[in-house]
Image (cartoon, rainbow, N blue to C red):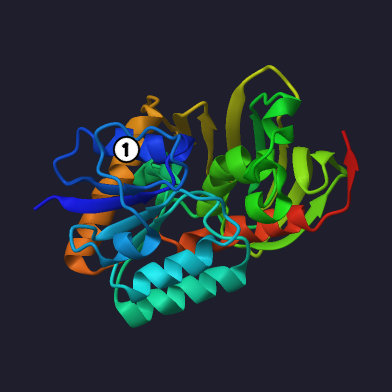
Amino acid sequence: MSLGVGIVGFGVAGRQHAAALDPMPEAGVAAVLELDASVDTGDLRRAGSWRELLDDPDVELVALCVPPGGRAGMAVEALEAGKAILLEKPPAVSAAEIDMITDAAARARRPVGVMLQHRVRLPAQVLAVDWANPAVTAVLEVSRFRPPAHYRRTGWRSDPVAALGGIAAHLGVHYLDLACQVLGRPDSVTLAPTRQLAEGIDTRVTGTVVFRSGATLAFTVTAESTVRTERLQVLGPDGGLSITDGTVITQIGDTGRTWPTAPTAALRGEVYKEMAESVATGLPPRRCHLEGARAVTDILAAVAGEPAVLA
């Protein structure tokens, strides 16, 4: 039977979720909760309230496509109502929020996943390599232009409490999370002066991360260049890994291999397949689990707490 999904929030992320679900036999949209009456949800059934959505027996999984600030409380309420949860990125504003959601999930015995779909790009051959050692170093760059009006308009994007930040939290998060899937948990984060368009809304973040293993990462994320690129390079004593605009290239010993870029919409569909399997089995999702987001949450929390200069 198809997994019934209730999408909460029908902005850009909510519409992306609906598009990913549209061709899937494993899951489909059971209802949408969007409180702004001017937002068109098309032919999708519209829930009248949060309570109505939680009481709907056709909704087995709640996809929270709302801003990060306040999302954790909604996740706990949904879990207590017996629903599985899929959190949009960034999934939490702190490790304490992850703990709160994880504890509620354990009590409810329901799975929680995160829409950090780029994890699906990592082949099993990459994950089988021990990258987390002191001889490993990595470099990350993400550039996605956003005009000042993108952050200055009214609404949650200009509110640092609701948004958790700017370019790092909402676009850099994907490749920062990929780095953490390979390198592990951070031990320390050191930042250069962060450029901000408004207080708490970053447009450029540059820094270094030292991981608990001793591996290091130098990174920069910017919304100020019109050049679009996403690149993570990991160099170790036994080989290297490069992920550039979705294409994965490895050089392990004498063997090189390339995995072509998969469409992002298809990756979101893979996340929903994992969630459908998790709801059926009661086990955490294999790749897009919340526990794996602790590391990137640590980095984003460091960015949010860093003094900055206005751009």
Residue 78 x %, y %: 37, 68
Q: In which quarter of the image is residue 265?
A: top left
301 with respect to 236 (left or right): right
Q: Is residue 81 above or below residue 218?
A: below
Q: Which of 206 and 82 is in front in this view?
A: 82
Q: Nearer the viewer, residue 262 or 133?
A: 262
Quarter of the C terminus within the rendering: top right
Secondary structure of the residue carrying tag 1 is: helix
Residue 222 x %, y %: 72, 32
Q: Label 1 belongs to which residue?
A: 18
178 with respect to 62 (left or right): right
Residue 210 x %, y %: 72, 57
Would residue 167 be visible to someone looking at this image? Answer: yes
Which residue is rendered at x = 45% and y = 62% of the image? 290
Q: Which amino acid does label 1 sit on?
A: Ala
Which residue is rendered at x = 62% and y = 61% of the image? 93
Q: In which quarter of the image is residue 282?
A: bottom left
Residue ranking furthest to the right: 309
Q: Is residue 249 above or below residue 154?
A: above
Residue 305 x %, y %: 79, 58
Q: In this view, does 170 lie above or below 296?
A: above
